[in-house]
Image (cartoon, grey):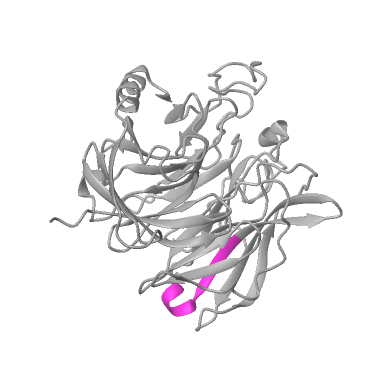
Amino acid sequence: MAKAARPTIALYARIAALAGATAVSFAAGSALAETKTFNTKTGPVAVESIAGDLAQPWAVDVLPGGGYIVTELGGNLRTVVDGKVSEPIEGVPKVAVMGQGGLLDVALSRDFETSRRLFLSHAVGENGAYGTAIVSARLSDDGSRLEDVKEIFRMNKLTDKGQHFGSRLAVAEDGSLFFSIGDRGERNRAQDMRDHAGAVLHINADGSIPANNPYADGKNGLPELWSKGHRNIQGMAIDPADQRLVTVEHGARGGDEVNYPQAGKNYGWPVITYGKDYSGAEIGEGTTKPGYEQPVFYWDPSIAPGGMVVYRGDMFPEWKGDLLVAALKYELLSRLDRDDAGAITAEERMLDGEYGRIRDVAVAADGSVLLVTDAEDGQLLRLTRPISE
């Protein structure tokens, strides 16, 4: 059940969690074109599958002028235009497919329409040890290949562990890049200021260090670090309204968190957490401790969150400012209602169990919502307003 860092929010969340979305479905032609309508607290939403046969899609971004770009965990990058899935795009750097690692996130640069520059996060391997890297590349004019591929970041300490690579990307208004790396299954690394693991990191588009980073001089931490104490962030976005960074991370058994990471702050893992170990044992020193930040919101039990967006589209004006969070374990889309100050006041769970594990969420230019499902035969889904009869 969803919980927040304050008792009043927890009460709202308990009420919302009881209000599951009721589905009314109808077929519209082929299985791929099937559309379902779901009743939600703010009115009906229609869900259609616009592409299928994607092999464990991990991320989706929206291309200018229509179309989408999708990563597949196994290492393929594809475009989807008019419902047609492309052949794998050539030139993707070598990807290490190991445990939870593979080809992970994709994000377009702010000037993509002119530069066609994009960023990818992926797992890399060296001598049986693995970690997370970030590359910059240009998508060719015909969309068939990557050009001018450059690795702009590689984490400093690799391990043979197969979990918690992160790794979401968010491009800031100035073109710089925020991204996450999990604790790599070695929890104490999240408190090591000389380790990239368990962190939000911030670099310029060319891999250089922004002057406003909290440890830019390297004296008290690695220059790339923005915040520490994160277990495994797989949802990250920058709110278009105020440029605030928002993240969602996996807890252990409970303790999934929403945070607003600030420069130089420590978000507690594994010293403080609202979750327990999978064995049921306690982790760390409790839920609070001076010097460590509290989450804006947390879930217990865990929903296993994936990607996340701050909704600022026009199609669902009643969702403006809310967070939309993909969930793997509970196979749903969580809508977190926020007030003007950013406090989370309630949760609504949508599409509960209808489409399997939901890995990522994005918003198109028209305000429709895009989802990808985490399966060997994954789908790209689109949420819209139902057409009035």
Answer with the quarter of the image where residue 27 lies. bottom left
- Position of residue 217 relative to residue 1, above or below, is below
Viewer-side residue, 88 vs 188: 88
- Position of residue 136 relative to residue 5, above or below, is below
Which residues are drawn in magenta? 112-120
Please state if 212 lies on the left or on the right of 384 as rendered: right
Which quadrant does the C terminus fall into? bottom left
- State the residue at coordinates (70%, 41%): 184
Residue sitting farthest toward the bottom: 141
- State the residue at coordinates (34%, 49%): 242
The location of residue 137, given as percent across then percent down, is 59, 72
- Residue 339 visible to the viewer: yes
Which quadrant does the N terminus fall into? top left
- Position of residue 135 relative to residue 369, above or below, is below
Viewer-side residue, 329 vs 112: 329
The location of residue 272, given as percent across then percent down, is 58, 23
- Position of residue 269 relative to residue 388, above or below, is above
Answer with the quarter of the image where residue 219 lies. top right
Viewer-side residue, 68 vs 3: 68
Please state if 338 lies on the left or on the right of 163 as rendered: left
Viewer-side residue, 388 vs 137: 388
Question: Does the stretch in magenta take in 269?
Answer: no
The location of residue 47, given as percent across then percent down, is 32, 52
- State the residue at coordinates (72%, 66%): 94
- Residue 170 visible to the viewer: no
- State the residue at coordinates (36%, 71%): 66
The location of residue 81, given as percent across then percent down, is 42, 72
Answer with the quarter of the image where residue 323 lies. top left
